[in-house]
Image (cartoon, rainbow, N blue to C red):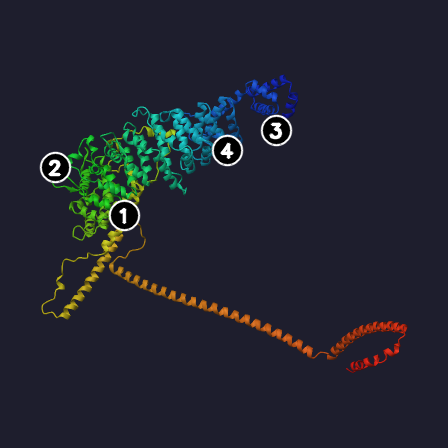
Amino acid sequence: MKKMDLVSGYKGVVGLVFGNENSSSNDDSYVERLLDCISNGKLAEDRRNAMAELQSVVAESHTAQLALGAMGAYKLVRGAVETLVSALTPVTHAKSHKNEVQPASMNSDLLSRDEQNISLLLSLLSEDDFYVRYYTLQVLTALLANSPIRLQEAILTIPRGITRLVDMLMDREVIRNEALLLLTYLTREAEEIQKILVFEGAFEKIFSIIKEEGGSEGGVVVQDCLELLNNLLRNNASNQVLLRETIGFDSLISILKLRGSTYSFTQQKTINLLCVLETIRLLLNGGSEADPAKDVERLTNKTVLVQRKVLDHLLMLGVESQWAPVAVRCGAFRCIGDLIVGHRQNLDNLASKFLGDEPQVEPALNSILRIILRTSSIQEFIAADYVFKSFCEENTDGQKILASTLIPQPFSMTHAPLEEDVNMSFGSVVLQTSCRAASVLSYVLKDNIQSKEKALQIELESPMPSFGSPEPLLHHLVKCLALASSKKGKDGKPNTPNSYVQPIILKLLVTWLSDCPSAVHSFLASRPHLTYLVELVSNGDATVCVRGLAAMLLGECVIFNKAIESGKDAFSVVDAISQKVGLASFFLRLDEMQKSFIFSSPKPAQCHKPLTRSNTDIRAEMEDIEEEDAYEHKNEDHPMLASMFDSQFVNFIKNLKIGIRDGIVKIYSHPKSNVSVMPAELEQRKDEADVDYIKRLKSFLEKQCSEIQDLVNRNATLAEDVANTGGGGSSQTEPRPNGGSERVQIETLRRDLQETSQRIEMLRREKSNIESEASSYKTLCAKTESDLKSLSDAYNSVEEANHRWENEVKALKNGDIEAIKAEAKEEAEKESEAELGDLLVCLGQEQSKVEKLSGRLMELGEDVDGLLQGIGDDGGAPEEDEDDI
């Protein structure tokens, strides 16, 4: 308000000074004085007044505008904007306190409160002065860093605000780079701004700059362009559709092409490739989770990308270009996994790919498997393993094809040099004793009973004939598991690399035995296997994950066991658990595993963070981590297991735990069906009558049934209590009976209660039927009553009408008949008088005719009287008769 008052106060002075447009000397001197006051004024109030007056003068006078430009006043604007940049940039001091007020944040807050300030800054982007535009972009970037929400809202409300920013991408290189940074920060979490940028042609400008800078060989500008591109595509299905339908994916895929020396990878080139790989993953993941068309758009993106040969470039980066950094190879493998998962055509495309040059040509899956087995980088192993996980997920046919290649090779062949490995099939490589191969094999066998049965038929040849006959693959895996646990380090503790070997092999065994009784039978065919598992569950040196998975494997030997022979059936396994481990300790192992960070840590579908300038350097510098240097903590699970044990496996373990608990309770609650020992009491004694023998047998059986029932009840109660206290899947607060007799009573009461409930329910149904019939009868009675009432009303109305008519008849009968006759006579007289009058008229007319005729006859000399004689007599009779009548 004060500013407006100052401006209005100076209007009179301005009018006097600039009243004459031709007085250029006055104009120049007046503008010069105002500029001098703004630049050299001692008091802040004087400088503000001079600035307000200068604004008013320049707005009203053309001469003042010329004078202002001639004196180089735009340097003041440049200086003002540069000062704002300094005021909004934090200054770090060594002795700064945490609670100290930050001037940069405070100034940003004050400047961004007024939308007109943002509008003024955006208008400065249209100025011709280079430094004004440059510093203005820096001011906006600083405001965005300190007050992002306000600046985003202000830019959205200002007309053509975003358009001016996009136009800066076509400006000089320095300004273009600043505009790139500003738009990158502006689009990170602003979906509306992302959409407007795309409609303003941001895609075309971004790829034009990338091409101009040299693609993946370019500098940090390419990185900024790709980061801006990722912001526009992340969780934004509409922008992905526009990119696909307008300029296509060719410009994006061309950045993946390796130019020049394929073994030359600078740090910036690595970062650029990581950014474009993230762009591809964003397209493969589709829009936001709330978008109903996400799955359709994701499949469409996958189809179009494969049609544009992106799979070939990804295989080149991940498999064929071994000079590529580990981070780039890992990113390529993750993109391949996302590209093929859930897409039948892409799965077939990968399965049909061959890599290498003649004669060393092999399937792409074989090449990826070789990397899994031989890489020294754990990150690369996890990324390549993800490819096989994606290939086998919901791909039953693919699993069967891979399982069909499980053909054992001679021992000498499995240890052939590298150049000879290409002649081996996929399954032959898998059969090597490696936990990494076990991880791949677990994907091949998951939820596929045919593949599990096929793998059970595999027998491996011993390295030397003296070692014995070939052994099944399942037994060989158990040997590998025991070998991994037996290896000791120099300090007598297990070797560090084995901290993930055992869990991965156990994961394969758990997957294999799940819902496969034949695999359980094969596993228990060797008696040492059960003993070893029991010892592994009780081993205090083993990790939490190893003990828990071993307990899961024991549980599967119970619930999926269909054997009936002693020593291999489910009862024998449960007895071994209860005697050597204890049910409480057994369930405690399952609980400890589920509470560990591997199973309790969140496992979102996409856990990687967006690539920005702050974290790309860290990812690009990812080194090949050797197994021996990966993890130093003893007796703890390896962190990489959190990536290997995905959410699907964690949920599988959770459901399996519930099934194991219920299965063990069921085993305890039901005795064995076969009784091999016959008590002596069942035999008939000498000289014992048949009747007495039958009575004694009946008494013996009743006693045995009672004892068996008590034992069964006690076992069931014990198993449930142990399951609840020692790690059962669900806590139950219901009190348990302490003895079998109480349990029998409770069961009897429950049956009585159930029968009573059934009778009550039957009575309720009968009552409901009776009530329904009564309701229908009541409705019928109401309808009948309504009909009777309507008939009664009709009858009453008829009676009333009849009564009214009778009254009218009586009135007619008892009325004044004489009056009626008089009235009728009067009317008759009136009618007779009218007729008489008419008759008299006629007679008068006839009389006049007679007189005329008489006169004529007299003239003619006729005797009129003679002629008329007798005429009156002839007509008199009828008249008299009429009178009589």
Taking depth in this image into account, of 733 and 643 the one nearest to the observer is 643
Would residue 546 be found to the left or right of residue 131 on screen?
Answer: left
Residue of label 1: 657
Q: How packed is label 4: few (under 14 Cα within 10 Å), some, or many (20 or more)?
A: many
- Marks 3/2 in contact by CB < 8 Å: the verdict is no
Spatial separation of the CA atoms under disc 4 and disc 1 = 55 Å
Q: Which of marks 4 and 1 is in front?
A: 4
Cα–Cα gap, marks 2 and 1: 41 Å
When asked about the image quadrant of residue 259, the answer is top left
Q: Label 1 crowding class (10 Å Cα cut-off): few <14, some 14-19, many 20+?
A: many
Given contact means CB atoms under 8 Å apart, are the residues at marks 3 and 1 in contact? no
Q: Name the residue under label 2.
A: 464
Counting residues from the start of the chain, the first of labels 3 and 2 encountered is 3
Amino acid type, mark 4: Ala
Q: Are marks 4 and 3 in contact (CB under 8 Å)?
A: no
Where residue 852 appears, as percent x and y from the top left, is 87, 71
Q: Which amino acid does label 1 sit on?
A: Lys
Give the foreground label among 2 and 4. Answer: 2
> Between tags 3 and 2, which lies in front?
2
Q: Mark 3 points at which residue?
A: 5
> Image height check: is 78 above or below 562?
above
The answer to whether mark 2 and mark 1 are in CB contact below 8 A is no
Please give the name of the residue rendered at 61% of the width and 25% of the height, measured from the top-left corner.
60
Give the SS element for disc 4: helix
Sequence-wise, the earlier of marks 3 and 1 is 3
Distance (Cα) linking label 3 and label 1: 79 Å
Neighbour class for label 2 at 10 Å: few (<14), some, many (≥20)?
A: few
In what element is the residue under mark 2?
loop
Q: Which of marks 2 and 4 is nearer the N terminus?
A: 4
Asked if 745 appears above or below 30 in the picture, the reply is below
Viewed as shown, does residue 770 lie left or right of 6? left
Q: Quadrant of the N terminus?
A: top right
